[in-house]
Amino acid sequence: MSTLNSVTTVKQPAVGRSAAGTRIGYGLLYLVLLIAAVAQILPLVWLFLFSLKNNQEVFNLPPFSLPASPKWENYVTVWQQGSIGRYFMNSVSITLISVVLTILLASFVTFAITRMRWKLSAVVLGLFMIGLMIPVHSTLIPLFILFQKLGMTDSHSSIILSYTAFNLPITIMILLGFYYTLPREVEEAAVMDGCSVNRIFFQIILPMTSSVLVTAAIINMIYNWNEFIFVNTFISTDTLKTLTVGVQNFVGQYTTDWGAIGATLMISILPILIMFMVLSNRIVEGIAAGSVKG
Amino acid sequence: MDKVMSNKWVIALYVLPSLLIIMGIIYIPIVLTGYYGLMEWDGVSAMTFIGLENYTTLFNDSAFWSSVSHSFLFAVLSTVSLGVYLLVALVLSGNIKGANLLRKIYLIPMLLSSVAIAQLWLKIYHPTNGILNSALESLGIQDPPAWLAEPSLVLYALFVPILWQFAGFYILIYYAALKNIPTTLIEAARIDGATPWQIAFKIKLPLIAEVFKVTIVLAVVGSLKYFDLIYVMTDGGPNGASEVMASYMYHKAFRGFDFGYGSAIGFFLLIICLVATWIIRRMTASKDNIQYS
């Protein structure tokens, strides 16, 4: 009791000073946070600025200056000269097909594991979860040989299958938590009414999980859109490449034209940036939920 | 109810397609990687069984071990930077104005492809016109280094964009975990006279210890298999100074057409990742998990 008292009495006079100290401390910390935010954004601002310049302006003007007249034609040139439009459509179709396939298959598996009764469910779940730890690179050589034998290299099917396989574990993991929270009474009532399992899944459970499906779809989209090594290894025909890999080759041809490189990179990151502006809360939530895949 | 919900046909229909896909794309290839690692093979002509010869070569291959050491350097640097991310998240979660916006801004680079990030940072590090060296020159520094061409600097220069890419991701995870701590707990501590520092280090950090352990595994394993950015920015150069395990494997298999040796490296990479996960889990396992509801 006496120690408690002495602590409070000793502390009392210090409160004023420590409050001011805390405020200065917080001010400093806040400054650090702001500097970090600027550091995250600044390279992208610089990229945008040099995508609007010609080489002369890049080399002679200060890095963060605006050019006298923005060279929007850089964007037109790279869009017309290369196959960027083609790459873009390839990325869109591969991403969409893989996402739909992954989400549907993962929902089937998660439903069977969490809602249905069978002996091997824990083993099967384990197989999917161990998949989270397997590095993609350790499967690359056999997959290349396998797809070559099946005549699937240089086709989108090899890419879609690979994306689906490697995204199933993380997608199932995101769905699991949500499925466990759904009350059992839902199917009990449905079974009473004579519903088949298929109807329970498609007409009752699947619609109930729509919010978590959106989260999982966003995570899948970001991973697929940005994936590099599979496309770079399996696809050799230029017109079949995705934006990520196509950009890499395309930039190689323009090593000295900064404006063209800047415009190409901006085109490749713009869809993701726009999606982020529209769906940032969902994306933040999704990444927090799917954090196991680094 | 039970009869309907344990219908074997439906279960098979729901589970088998996915199971076949992960078997064919993940598990069978893993076994094949181990198998090819015992062969001498250029990927085209017939394989020759050579037992563990690839592994003995691997063991004496100094270029391989230097790539391993580079991968581990990235793992150590990434793990150390977790401490910084945690501090940022601690400040951010302390009811700061604009915290939500800030964590979103931090996250932006993580959404971009490693290729775009690599191309952008190639420009940033450009020896004469890059933003970094122009800034250094305007500060009066003569002849700033060509960052990616210096063997002694290249690994650290490569780590900066990696940091830039993943900082927001880890901050977001820590922030979410910290926001999950019940406010009643923090209030109780405050009423008992705990200082903000005590609340942060004695209450908040122990409560998110589990999350921290998961992120250590993520950072270490993620670094050990890091590939895209290095492949685009330096391709392992100059002269192998930035070669990492995955890029070494890729070069041996798809440039040197030594699929047997490449597979041995790939298998080794798998083992290292699994062992690293296991060791970190063991080292950080605690008997007294702090729980709260």
Image (cartoon, helix red, strand yellow):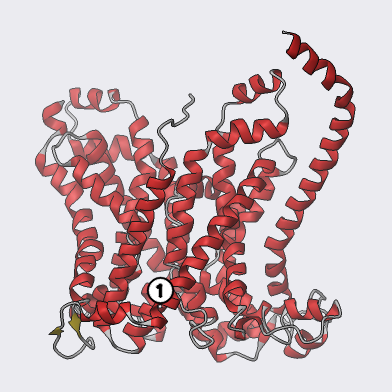
Can see residue A229? yes
Mark 1, residues whose alpha carbon is within 10 Å: few (<14), some, or many (≥20)? Answer: many
Q: Name the one closer to the observer, A120 or B257.
A: B257
Q: In the image, is A292 to the left or to the right of A67?
A: left
Q: Which residue is mark 1?
A: B245
The answer to whether B173 is drawn above or below residue A208 in the figure is: below
Q: Position of residue B15 (x, y in %)?
A: 19, 48
The answer to whether B30 is drawn above or below residue B176 in the figure is: below
Q: Position of residue A150 (x, y in %)?
A: 18, 77
Can see residue A279? no
Residue located 69% across and 49% down the image:
B102
Q: Position of residue A187 (x, y in %)?
A: 25, 28
Outermost residue, top direction? A1
Label 1: chain letter = B
Q: Quadrant of the N terminus of chain B?
A: top left
Residue located 57% across and 48% down the image:
B172
Q: Name the one closer to the observer, A265 or B223.
A: B223
Indicate the quadrant where residue B130 lies: bottom right
The answer to whether A44 is drawn above or below residue A253 in the figure is: above
Residue located 28% across and 25% down the image:
A184
Indicate the quadrant where residue A90 lies: bottom left
Q: Name the one closer to the observer, A31 or A210.
A: A31
Residue located 52% across and 85% down the image:
B237
Q: Position of residue A269 (x, y in %)?
A: 57, 68
Q: In the image, is B191 to the left or to the right of A80?
A: right
Q: Tell me the element at label 1.
A: helix
Q: Mark 1 belongs to which amino acid? A: Met
Q: How many marks?
A: 1
Indicate the quadrant where residue A21 lies: top right
